[in-house]
Image (spheres, grey):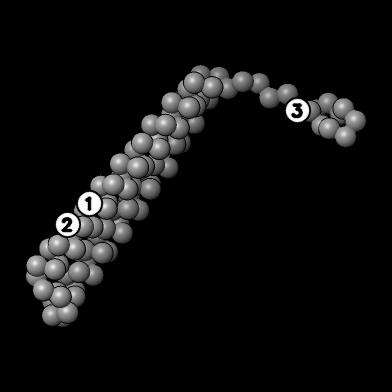
Amino acid sequence: PVMDGKIIRLNIPPLSEERRKQIIGQVKQMGEKAKISVRNIRRDANKALDDEEKSKLISEDDRDKGKKDIDNITKKCSDKVDSAIKAKSEETMSD
């Protein structure tokens, strides 16, 4: 560290390619955890729909429509996670 009046300057070396690959690996792990969480939420929502249909609170058609909507939302969320992983990986390698 270098003291320059009221400012402290830290020299940080640029990332090596090996370190960049490690960071990308961590990003992919975090993305996979996020997708697992989304799938768990989908499972819970589908179970809730099944329980409501068994209790006669909703019809079978409503349950099927709800499951289809949940699957569409799950796919959108997974796609967002994938695009975030890809963007962060490209950003890390380009710096």
Neighbourhood count class around disc 1 (C-alpha, 10 Å): few under 14, some 14–19, many 20 upward: few
Q: Is residue 69 above or below residue 85?
A: below
Asked whether 10 or 19 is in front, the reply is 10
Q: Amino acid at mark 3?
A: Leu
What residue would you read off at disc 1? 72
Neighbourhood count class around disc 3 (C-alpha, 10 Å): few under 14, some 14–19, many 20 upward: few
Which of the 4 quarters of the picture holds residue 13? top right
Left or right side of 86 for 59: left
Asked whether 8 or 30 is in front, the reply is 8
- Secondary element type, mark 1: helix
Q: Is residue 67 visible?
A: yes
Q: Are discs 3 and 1 less than 8 Å apart at CB? A: no
Between disc 2 and disc 3, whose residue precedes?
A: 3
> Measured from the top left, where is residue 82 in percent x and y?
34, 38
Quadrant location of the N terminus in the rendered image: top right
Q: Amino acid at mark 2?
A: Lys
- Secondary element type, mark 3: loop
Q: Which mark is residue 10?
A: 3
Q: Is residue 3 above or below residue 43?
A: above
Farthest left residue? 60
Quadrant location of the C terminus in the rendered image: top right
For the residues marked 2 and 3, what is the alpha-carbon distance in whole angstroms? Answer: 53 Å
What residue would you read off at disc 2? 68
> Measured from the top left, where is residue 39 in percent x and y?
28, 53
Q: Amino acid at mark 1?
A: Asn
Q: Is residue 22 visible?
A: no
Give the number of the mark in front: 2 or 3: 2
For the residues marked 3 and 1, what is the alpha-carbon distance in whole angstroms? Answer: 48 Å
> Measured from the top left, where is residue 3 in percent x and y?
86, 29
